[in-house]
Amino acid sequence: MTKTKPYILVTNDDGIAAPGIHALVLELQKIARVVVVAPDSEKSAVGHAITLSDPIRVSTFKKSDYWEGFAVSGTPSDSVKIAVSALLERRPDMVISGINLGSNAGINVIYSGTVSAATEGTILGIPSIAVSLTTYTEPDFGPAARFAVKMVDFVLTNGLPERTLLNINVPDLPESEIAGVKITRQGMANFAETFDKRIDPRNRVYYWMDGKKEELDDGDDVDDEAIKRGYISITPVKYDLTNYEYLDTLRDKLAENLNWKK
Amino acid sequence: MTKTKPYILVTNDDGIAAPGIHALVLELQKIARVVVVAPDSEKSAVGHAITLSDPIRVSTFKKSDYWEGFAVSGTPSDSVKIAVSALLERRPDMVISGINLGSNAGINVIYSGTVSAATEGTILGIPSIAVSLTTYTEPDFGPAARFAVKMVDFVLTNGLPERTLLNINVPDLPESEIAGVKITRQGMANFAETFDKRIDPRNRVYYWMDGKKEELDDGDDVDDEAIKRGYISITPVKYDLTNYEYLDTLRDKLAENLNWKK
């Protein structure tokens, strides 16, 4: 741990009043100066949305006597952007997004506001991590919060590769029952979506999106699989989406097909 | 081209009434059976957002005598999901998202609703492409629409690798002046964001997000660079975000740091 306390921006996608962010802040305050800038309401599954067409409002938020922060009328990405560009006294040493209520593994990484907030920190050049607790019921955020503190030390000491953040999922277990830590790749278990068609009181049709994650046996180095076995899963996530392996094949095939000189 | 006409789902993020989607549909109708399912209003920069907390409405939309489609009260990703799960008579042979008004290259790929709709098609196992025209003023969508038709033929003949879509950006030039086609990687030119702080008529502070893309010389195999030189840029985009190169290093360093057995 460095001598001067690190300055950490905490955000989330469950909204600034969510219990997961509170647990994280309480734990981080023991080792860091913490500033909280987060959406003013739940923004789950917003992906990497940003707000360009609407004005953004910022209000102060007080969590009893524990901490104060800024509530933002936008998305998790908006919150990180406006924090760094307009609200914070200086660039933070780290961005931590969480603790999310519910897993952000597999295909969920694509939709996750929690991960996108950490991505936004990374885009801004700040080492960032996303932390999720893999349950929706009666959560104890303690183990995840304490593990986040360990990861602060790790990240500030070792840094992270370019354009890379850590996506951390902590299983819903007492610390003594957590099997260990697995470095994983993003699994690709799909959602099987269904749309529940209903009729409203004014006789108009509407739909609810619903879905079930399909279990895909991707192998035991996969995020969802590690969590299922009681491990903390850490996936290094990079936001360069290029499929490098396919570049040459595509170039060759397309040149032939379109009759164009490479 | 196959004997029976392919069945193509067209969507976008500018909204079903946007001129870019109309130009695309008109051109595609010459070679395909086209069905249009798109957001009922502009949904730019929504990233991969999906709508879980609100009901989704679907209404029919008629573009004069040219075509009919479904307008969805959700995001581009929602539109693709509900089209495939609930609205279409069968799985489409391809998903085409666009033609977007404005470039979707570099860091924009992360925020793009246009690209995320094509990603959604890919997640559902359907070959998908995103098409954008790199201008905001007085667009002629013709060249981009005709190029999209060529790419339908290419994709249906050759297929695409697993979890991979094509992100196509067409420069704003007459066909005769387009320099050619470049297979590119996603550049990482950042946005330098600013937040314009204003006071509303009720004396409350609000912010507008603004920003300027910073020119980063990433090399001449980069999407933005190809466009600037008058080429059509095609980037194969893969939605597995794992940083594979970093997996082993992270595993070693973290095991040492946390004193944990690998």
Image (tube, coloured by chain):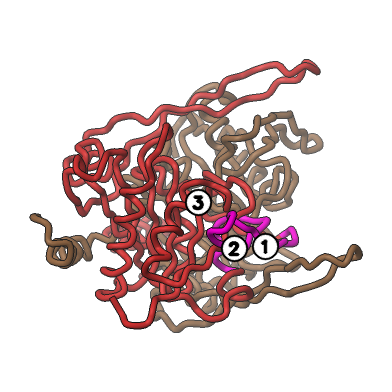
Chain colours: A red, B brown
Q: Residues within 10 Å of mark 2 (few under 14, many from 20)?
A: some
Check the image and report above or below for B202 versus A231: below
Number of marks present in the image shown: 3
Answer whether residue A195 is magenta in the image.
no
Q: Earlier in the sequence, mark 1 or mark 2?
A: 1
* Three-letter amino acid code of the residue under disc 1: Thr
Q: Quadrant of residue A251?
A: bottom left
Of residue A131 and residue A256, the one placed in the foreground of this image is A131
Q: Earlier in the sequence, mark 3 or mark 2?
A: 2
Badge number at residue A69: 2
Q: Residue at x 75, y 45 (%)?
A: B17
Check the image and report above or below for B140 versus B177: above
Query: Where does label 1 land, which residue?
Result: A60
Of residue B157 and residue B22, the one placed in the foreground of this image is B22
Badge number at residue A113: 3
Q: Residues within 10 Å of mark 1 (few under 14, many from 20)?
A: few
* Three-letter amino acid code of the residue under disc 3: Gly
Residue range in magenta is A53-81
